[in-house]
Amino acid sequence: MIIVPCYNIVLAPEINLYFAGEYFKEITREKGEQGQTVVFLMLKEDKPREAMQPYDFYPIGITGTIEAVDKEGNVKIKTGSRVNIDSIDAADGTIEVTLSKRQDVDDMSPEESAKHFDNARMAFIQSIQNTQNMQFHLLARNYIQQWESLGELTATLSYHLPISNEEKYLILAADTLSERTERMEQAIFQYVEAEKVKKEAAAAQQNQNEKVYREQAIKKQIEFLQNELDEMHPENISDARKFEKKIEAAGMNETAHAEAVKVLNRMKQEGQDSHEYGMLYDYLDFVTTLSWKKEEMKLVDLKEARKILDADHFGLDKVKRRIVQQLAVMTLNQKQSGSILLFVGAPGTGKTSIGQSIAKALGREYVRVSLGGIRDEAEIRGHRRTYVGAMPGRIMEGIKRSGVSNPVMVLDEVDKLAKDYGGDPSSALLEVLDPEQNSTFTDHYMNVPYDLSDVLFVCTANTTDTIQEPLLNRMEVIQFPGYTASEKFQIAKRHLLPKAMEEMGIHQEKLKVSDAALRTIISDYTMEAGVRGLKKRLDTLCRTAAVRLVEGNRRCISVSPGQLQKYLDRKPLLHDHMLEQKQPGVVTGLAWTQAGGEILFIEALFTKGKGNVIITGQLGDVMKESVQIAVSLAKSRFPEKAELFENHDLHIHVPSGAVPKDGPSAGITLTTAIVSLVIGKAVSPKIAMTGEVSLRGCVMPIGGLPEKLMAAVRAGIRTVFIPVENENDLDEVPSEVKKSLEIIPVHMVSDVLEKTGLC
């Protein structure tokens, strides 16, 4: 007796089973011979023979007899009756069982059984017609004609039936023929319906695929023909077609691409006669013109960068050093990194033009965005497209003008931003300059994110006083001090004069301007910290020379200091210079202006009166408070002079009276002037001072020290008192200026009075 464990097959009494030789030997471990008895045991789970245990088998099996074995070992088995498994012993691949016969109830006639078999076979034959499954063809060809019963049909299709192993066992476990037939018939028809649905789904999928393939083929044909027409008649290409090509070639991110396609479809639907067509056209033209592709970071040659900065700008050593540091950090990180630079200084000191040098050193495009006078937040973020006349903000407009995604962008005059009902442009600028946010900057007009993280932003301002604190905190302030007279001379000789001659069409051999004439222009015809006014004077000189060259047919013109009034067509400017004579109550102070530094004179005078303090010279609120502090300090220092203050009016005047003046740096000068007047002792006109004072007599720090010291040198001052806390600012003062002055840091008012001989 051969024990054959089986899994996932349907067995029934009195049916023929066919096993391939290799399969039969695998499951029996024996070579079956004709006439041998076989017992089929149903497994609950598929397991190797060596791992089988008694509880792995169902309690009902079936016997069979080997009827034939061919030369290849293929076996034909005829099943017999069902048996109960009374006991089973399985160990190391050996299986021993004790069996008892299980009764069957034959409750169907042969005709009825044949009818059920014919119905199931015909349903199966119909299901495999026109199928492409080769396995079904094989079944149809080899087995259909050999089937004699519903049991043989069900057994042959065992592995394809859509029922579980448990349900297949229940077919064998059915004690009546009618129940067994019903279960087998149900499994066959489930299979037939499943195959039918599968066939219908495959057909539907094939139809759908054919439609898709056909549509793709038609589109390719249309695209090919359209490209041919576009090449033959490029002037007739439609706007929609033009934007389709530009959208695909732009390299947009997914969000931007989806928005552009959406607007393009809307433009197609609206048609050229629609009143919204122009707005849709402008939007697509803008977003497809932008550079969306990320540019590769170029290696920066720091030596070459230094050469470029030195060639384009004379002086500014500290500024250049900081820029080179920024370039070095970017080179190491291979990405845009470091602080946002804010260049602060007087007009004409090179803040904007140095941005061009940075772009040249990096090999990038340069773009300048002027922010002066902006009051509306939409100027930064853009207008929403729901408004008539909507347009992008200045940031994205600058990106478009540059043509790349990583330009050097100079944001000019950030201190001139204003705030009104239109919003706060400074707050909108926070997102632009914040490295944590600008990678997804969303302009309201575009309505899609754009990556600004590769843009090198450089900001400029004349002062930081009007810049909001949150915006200022995102930037690193780099001061641009005014130029000294010698630096202006070198700038004029190397850059400004050659450029002015080139613009006027004057060859170098046609015009000679002496060094003395250049120095005279700087000293007598300009009064600024920068070189903007100097450039205007040189332009005027070259224009006048051009007229003389054309009218007089002169070969060459030489300009000396004595001829400047003729060429510049103006008189020299009147600078405030050191007083020639000293006088009690008059002290020289230093002031900062947006055009640089200037000296100013504090004049104090007692007149008969009732102790009033008279202030003239258009002083602002801060300076008026400084006057009150200075008067109080003088009274406290000289209590014996109380009668003088009570019986006289104190008149304080700051020339020139037509020029408004304000700021917290004249306190020490006012105090010294009043003390000088009280004791009747004059202060040397070669001494100037700057610093605010407190009621405790402390000299407080001030700003704009480099510009003030340069003004002192220009005016002929020899000694300057500055607050002790401003000593560190001397590092920003040109060495030429420091060599020309005796700079004395002071901590208290008494220090100033002692060193000026007033106590």
Image (cartoon, rainbow, N blue to C red):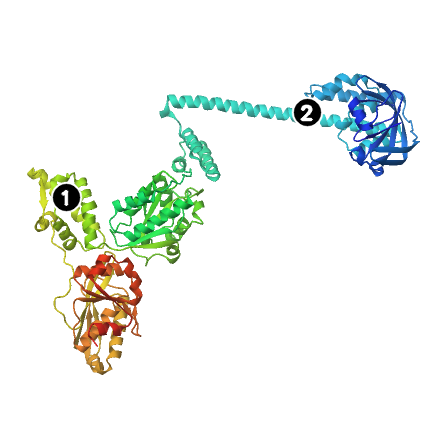
Residue 451 location (% of width, % of height):
43, 43
The quadrant in which residue 144 appears is top right
Report the Cα–Cα distance between label 2 and label 1: 92 Å
Secondary element at image label 1: helix
In the image: residue 444, left or right of residue 323: right
In the image: residue 683, left or right of residue 421: left
Nearer mark to the viewer, of 2 and 1: 1
Q: Residue at x 32, y 57 (%)?
A: 464
The quadrant in which residue 344 appears is bottom left
The quadrant in which residue 440 appears is top left
Q: Residue at x 44, y 34 (%)?
A: 264
Q: Amino acid at mark 2?
A: Lys
Q: Residues within 10 Å of mark 1 (few under 14, many from 20)?
A: many
Q: Is residue 146 above or below residue 420?
A: above
Q: Residue at x 80, y 33 (%)?
A: 49
- What is the count of numbered marks? 2
Q: Amino acid at mark 1?
A: Cys
Residue 559 location (% of width, % of height):
10, 46
Secondary element at image label 2: helix
* Quadrant placement of the C terminus: bottom left
* Quadrant placement of the N terminus: top right
Mark earlier in primary sequence (2, 1): 2
Residue 105 location (% of width, % of height):
92, 29
Query: Label 2 belongs to which residue?
Result: 199
Q: Is residue 421 visible?
A: no
Query: Residue 612 — which label?
Result: none
Query: Residue 542 — which label?
Result: 1
Residue 578 location (% of width, % of height):
15, 64
Q: Is residue 45 visible?
A: yes
In the image: residue 53, left or right of residue 599: right
Q: Name the residue nearer the viewer: 218 or 594.
A: 594
Q: Name the residue nearer the viewer: 453 or 97.
A: 97
